[in-house]
Image (cartoon, rainbow, N blue to C red):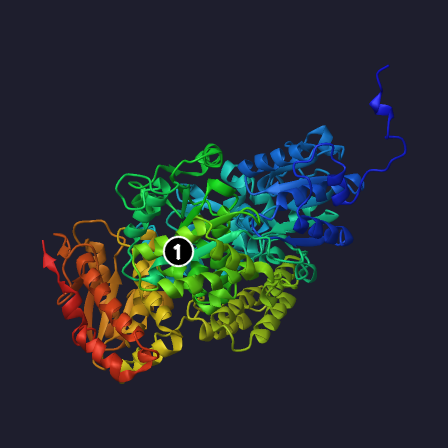
Amino acid sequence: MALNWDLIGTGDSEALLRPRDIYAGLASRPWPYLRHEQGEVLDKWFDRREQRDVVIKQNTGGGKTAVGLLIAQSTLNENIGKAVYLTPDNYLAKQVRQEAARLNIATADDPYDPVFLAAQAVLVTNYQKLINGRSAFGVVGDGREPVELGIVVVDDAHAALARTEDQFRLRVPAEHEAYRELLELFTQDLRHQSANAWAGLEDKDPTALAPIPFWAWADKRDEVLKILRPHRTERAFEFVWPLLAEVLHLCTATATSAAIEIRPSCPPIDRITSFVRARRRVYLTATLADDSALVTDFGADPSLVARPVTPGSAADLGERMILAPVALNPDLDDEAVRVLARQFADGDQDGDGVAETEPVNVVVLVPGERAAAPWARHAHHIWRVGDLETGVKELQAGHVGLVVLVNKYDGVNLPADACRLLILDGIPRPLDAVERREAVALADSTVRLAREVQRIEQGMGRGVRDGEDYCAVLLMGAKLATAIHDTRHLALFSPATRAQLKLSRDIAGQIKGGGLNSVRQALQACLERAPQWRERSRRALAEVRYAEHGTVRPEAVALREAFDLAATGRAPAAAERVQKAVNALGENDKALRGWLREQKAAYLHLTDPVAAQQALAGALSDNTFVLRSVNGAAPVRLKAAAVQSRAAAEFLAGRYRDGVSLRLGVQALFEDVVWGEEERSDDAEASWQSLGEHLGFASTRPEKLYGTGPDNLWALSATQQAVVELKTGCTTGTIAKKDMDQLGGSIRWLNDHNAEVEAVAVMLHPSRISDAKATAVPGMRVVTPALFERLKEAVTSYASALAASPDRWADEQAIREQLSHHKLTGDRFFTTYAEPVRTH
């Protein structure tokens, strides 16, 4: 007689609730046991499961997907309600569903699927499916009953942030009729903020960036509504408009030549009722140091976010050796590193075409197509997002060689032999208009550093997926090298990564100054599993513990609370809340203070416009890159340093703690000047300003400060100032009339504001030849790419000489000698590193 198994062992048994027990009860388990760290976090979550917001932190590759799925199943078994598991994209959603199948957890991919609606399966989908203005789960005001959820698991929560912010951004493209109408509406306001930026918009300059002042945006809210509302059902509007319509007056609007971007300071996440009302919200994150954005973007409870669930030990991270070639030897150029990478991919260590060692998969992460181009001759494959699913399977299946992934720093799993050498060649840059403005205003703030470190750590985590895995990591360029050397950056990495960086620095100290072979030998110790390396690597992590408390910055909490107050009509209380955050900052981080005071002014304006302008004037005293008040700010005369070498010594001593930092800092300046890339213009201008300070010149950016004047102004002496326009993004063979006219206008600006000094007209341009239609500015000189290379060599040598001895960069006499030797003094700089313009 056949046994009827449906009647055996299913009588009065209750569904298993503890995630550990759910796993133990599987008939076929993908692993004999859960990892110790997985078990720990699951037990801790179960004890805290009644808390609405729980952050779970594990090292990259620590098995977070299985943890999230078991938590979702536990909630279903407890009959709390429907379960949703959110991923950054469809590619990752597919991976999660595959993992769920291995765990025998039922999933759905459609929010209308009956098994999901009956709370019998976990809905696995991307963030956008839940968070959009036409969400299948319901949006406030759409007349539908919202879908009640028991739990929302947000996977890779920090990756979710950028996508969530994008869902709350309305982009009005330049070809849309509403773009033209909005520009006409705000013409005078934009011109007042920056005549140059307005001219850039008119010229369709891709680098033009013009914030619409908050007072103009708020005062003209009815006109804005009339322009935008008729388009609310169009494709470009329909998924965002329902989320922003009620808080349009609280949004920041920024005009570029491509679009007008409208974005709130915090996403009004309360429009997505299902997410806000969910009984449980679990955020799975890597071990990143700053969790503030979970509060600002998702409205998570800051007191709960500050108490993450973590394993007891952080030693579950696989072995990584992390080296930055440029920090080891400034003569190791990028091409040499590319050649080395290909040799490891081929197993051809001496370049003779014969494999001497086991070839390995080398994966290179680059932020965009331009960064991918130099790898083309070395790479076996260059893959974009659409190629990832097939490509990653190839890597996981066997040897592929050297592969370049374009702009994919998160969500790619490359365990074991899929990636043994990982290379980061740059990190993604701010893309939307608000982020570009923040990048200027908060350039050196901890807020920006934390975002940068987050992307670096995400990228470095692609190649190590569990505690037994191993991978070597190379960081290319001075900026990435600075991130693992500078103490401010280091403090923002996770504890386990910091421990690995410390070990890697010990190795770097021994091979410093060596050539390519030294780097190769160090990498081989990791890749060939040298016993000494393995022992020291394990020991470095053995006692590392996760941080007991998460970092939630007070100003982030204040901004979230202030926005929520203003959104419910309590603008004065919102302004007061931001002011409390300003008071708490004290004199620390003046750039952030000024930025916050601008936010306060925006809230004040809704009830007291006069007080708002007074607050904005105060913001300008802290941060010169915030909005200019209605009355504007009179340009401050730039005053030359009394002694150039003394000013340089004071600047360098205040900026750099050691010679390596100085060398990397100077190299990073030149990395930021990219010829032929218009979108890097802001970086080039900031770099040129900083270069002046490194050399002891008083240096400013009048156009950014006052909305008019040159890109850069250097005080070469008490009687002479260099008026500099940077056209590094140009690709024309001659200097165009509009560029020549701009330089002429900047010379007149200086003559009007400081007639006592002589103006030296300077332009950075790929050509020294004036267009036939242009009238050359008398006496102007041009820094061409060739002369810029000469300048780079001189300044790099200047920095290297100063970095050779401890504290020599603070020695006025030593600096004076180096400035003179390299012809970097005010009287010789532009005669040496710029040449006269030539008429066509």
Asked if 569 appears above or below 205 in the picture, the reply is: below
Q: Which of the two residues, 777 or 13, is positioned nearer the viewer here?
A: 13
**Which quadrant of the structure image shows residue 303?**
bottom right
Residue for badge 1: 522
Q: Position of residue 390 (x, y in %)?
A: 47, 32
**Left or right: 431 in relation to 223:** left
Total numbered labels placed on residues in the image: 1
Label 1 element class: helix
- For image coordinates 36% across by 65% down, the residue present is 704
The answer to whether residue 756 of the structure is visible from this angle is no
**Residue farthest top in this picture:** 1
Q: Which part of the image, by quadrant, shows the N terminus? A: top right
Q: Position of residue 205 (x, y in %)?
A: 32, 51
Other-residue count near label 1 (Cα within 10 Å), few / some / many at <14 / 14–19 / ≥20: some
- For image coordinates 56% across by 62% down, the residue present is 495
**Residue farthest front in this picture:** 531
Q: Position of residue 193 (x, y in %)?
A: 40, 63
**Left or right: 29 in relation to 11:** left
The answer to whether residue 600 of the structure is visible from this angle is yes
**Left or right: 837 in relation to 632:** left
Q: Which of the two residues, 194 or 784, is positioned nearer the viewer here?
A: 784
Tag 1: amino acid:
Ala
Asked if 647 appears above or below 315 in the picture, the reply is: below
